[in-house]
Amino acid sequence: MTHNDRPHGYDFGLPPDPVSQDSAVQPDRGSRLTAGQDAGATAAAQGAGDTPLGRKLVEENQRRRRLEHVQLQRPERTRVITVSNQKGGVGKTSTAVNLAVGLAKQGLNVLVVDNDPQGNASTALGVPHSSEVDGVYDVLVDEMELAQVVAPSPESDRIVVAPATIDLAGAEIELVSMVAREQRLSRALDQYAKAREEQGLERLDYVFIDCPPSLGLLTINAFVAASEVLIPIQCEYYALEGLSQLLRSIEMIQKHLNPDLVVSTILMTMYDGRTNLSSQVADEVRSHFPEQVLETMIPRSVRISEAPSYQQSVLNYDPQSTGALSYLEAAAEIAARGVPKSK
């Protein structure tokens, strides 16, 4: 199947080449489309005939209508997903945050563990993470209970966040001499699940662990704690460079520490349908990982980049944007695929 023949979205009959620059389609932040304006724009687009903008508006509204009829089912057990890639700037944090919000908007309970000392996931979800705040560092190094550090996110009443403070940068060194250093996050998650049950809270449906761009002890803790790995891959030339090292590290974790860990999902990010390069990279990745790659691809998007500066996910910052729509589709596809079987 060629690039042009293959659908780019989950089974919603999505259009090919979800164009990347939201600025080409979206109004400025102060003049976003309301639902009524959006419907009017669709009608205008239909009357516009074969103009690219008109076709895109029609296609995006069709995708939104299909999503309105999608009802995600709760997984039978909590899915713990580590979002990892040792290459920086590929959209790890944006992916963890926006998938979490997308699932929460469907009524699912989500925990986001910010395991990156930069604390970007905490910022995007509107959770304080100054050095005075208890966070993941205190859980890993001081064995504080996760229930004592999680905070609710203003993004959704179904999301709680374990924030990352700058102290987490020193955890890599401090953990080296500690007993059971690789299992500390895993034990903390188990204890938190029991604490929620004792408090009469609903169980978590999803846990997303946002990792730093490295393969150190913080990432190893995330691999040991998870049952699945989600790898965001940027649709650019260096996308596959370093991926083999990441996969070898995962194989070592599977062999020695967590035999149930699987690479369940690969998500193509920063996709620009107007360039041959994005298409070639996407085809290359799909040829190597046909079962893991999501049909949905995340476009290169101004809105996705802007949202964290307002301490929001793109789904709340600009829900009408192409980036928000794509993350909703990716969340639906992950939920529909279900829990993969370990090898």
Image (tube, grey):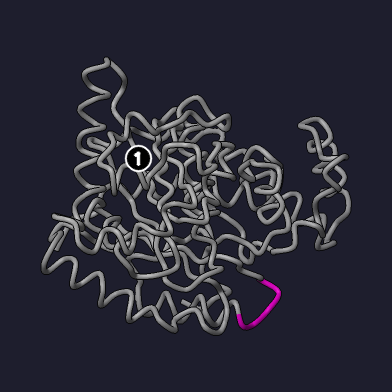
Vertical comparison of 35 with 323: above or below: above
Rendering coords of residue 53 (x, y %):
82, 58
Vertical comparison of 326 with 8: above or below: above
Relative to 233, 15 lies left or right: right
Residue 305 image-quadrant placement = bottom right
State the residue position of label 1: 206
- Residue at 62%, 38% in the rendered image: 65
Rendering coords of residue 337 (x, y %):
33, 50
Magenta stretch bounds: 273-277
- Residue at 70%, 42% in the rendered image: 310
Relative to 71, 227 lies left or right: left
State the residue in front, 44 or 130: 130
State the residue in front, 294 or 186: 186
Rendering coords of residue 308 (x, y %):
65, 48
Three-letter residue code for mark 1: Tyr
State the residue in front, 38 or 42: 38
> Which quarter of the image is occupied by the C terminus?
bottom left
Taking the view exactly as shown, the residue that stands out farthest to the top is 200
Vertical comparison of 277 with 37: above or below: below
Let me know if residue 274 is in the magenta part. yes
- What kind of secondary structure does the magenta stretch mostly adopt? loop
Let me know if residue 27 is in the magenta part. no
